[in-house]
Image (cartoon, grey):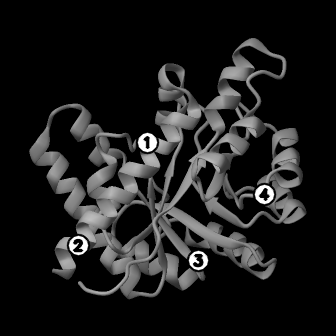
Amino acid sequence: MSGSWPHLRLGVNIDHVATLRNARGGSHPDPIRAARVAAEAGADGITAHLREDRRHIGDADIDRLMAETKLPLNLEMAATDEMLAIALRHRPYACCLVPEKREERTTEGGLDAAAQHNQLAPFVTRLVDAGIRVSLFIEASRVQLAVAKAMGAHVVELHAGAYCDADNAGDFPKRDKELERIRQAAREVAEIGLEVHCGHGLSFDTVGPVAAIPEIVELNIGHFLVGEAIFSGLDSAIRRMRNLMDHSRRAAQGIASA
């Protein structure tokens, strides 16, 4: 591939700053302060998942993110009437519809958009009509991509969890297989005219090969950065991630353009 690739955006998920705050109660650490640090460190957007049980980000956090930060907000949410009402009231830059189970620790997989078409389609329509960019967090599957397009979504966010888990476990054949699945899905998403994002589990060790995929224009990373901040600081962790993403993207473009 030749020519200039799109800038690879970094969305920083601040959920687990709120998780740490909620473990003790009170107001520290402040997720809105984390959002400001992310902006200074090179993030392009902020992601926050307002869950039904409010286990980390709360309603007041969304109020403050909209009022006190300048980066665009990507609101992750389940397709429920409560969350739709909140999204329509705040009108964030983007909403990413994700599966949500109360018993899970984190989002365990992508939406089954095909099986849930009748439930999801009205939510997508309402959000689009309100001028909100809509993303579907789905597994890399041709059927799921076609349904996302038909619903009117603007963005597909590919789930990188299986790739990252395989790398962490040292199962490199599976890691390579999962990475190729993401590459193929990214091509298919771009071919049908949707924007390609990717996230879940990305770290310093796993981000490079994903950042090198030319069709992907945004990575959403949270838990790893917040965890790394304990050792190096949030600013340092985000800057290092930003540099790794940019280096990988430039290197891949240079090889492809040679």
Label 1 and label 4: CA atoms lie apart by: 22 Å
Q: Residue under circle 2?
A: 254
Mark 4 or 2: the one toward you: 2
Q: Position of residue 44 (x, y in %)?
A: 60, 59
Q: Residue under circle 3?
A: 153
The three-letter code of the residue at mark 1 reads Arg
Q: Residue at x 58, y 36 (%)?
A: 235
Label 2 and label 3: CA atoms lie apart by: 32 Å
Label 4 and label 3: CA atoms lie apart by: 24 Å
Indicate the quadrant containing the N terminus: top left, top right, bottom left or bottom right: bottom left
Q: Are marks 1 and 4 in contact (CB under 8 Å)?
A: no
Please indicate, yes or no, whether residue 192 appears anywhere in the rendered image.
Answer: yes
Q: Position of residue 144 (x, y in %)?
A: 42, 71
Q: Are marks 2 and 3 in contact (CB under 8 Å)?
A: no
Closer to the chain start, of discs 4 and 3, is 4
User: Mark 2: few, some, or many residues within 10 Å (few <14, many ≥20)?
Assistant: few
The three-letter code of the residue at mark 4 reads Lys
Q: 110 and 131: which one is in front?
A: 131
The secondary element bearing badge 3 is classed as loop
Q: Position of residue 122 (x, y in %)?
A: 71, 74
Closer to the chain start, of discs 2 and 3, is 3
User: Mark 4: few, some, or many residues within 10 Å (few <14, many ≥20)?
Assistant: few
Q: Residue under circle 4?
A: 70
Q: Is residue 47 left or right of residue 144?
A: right
Label 4 and label 2: CA atoms lie apart by: 33 Å
Closer to the chain start, of discs 1 and 2, is 1
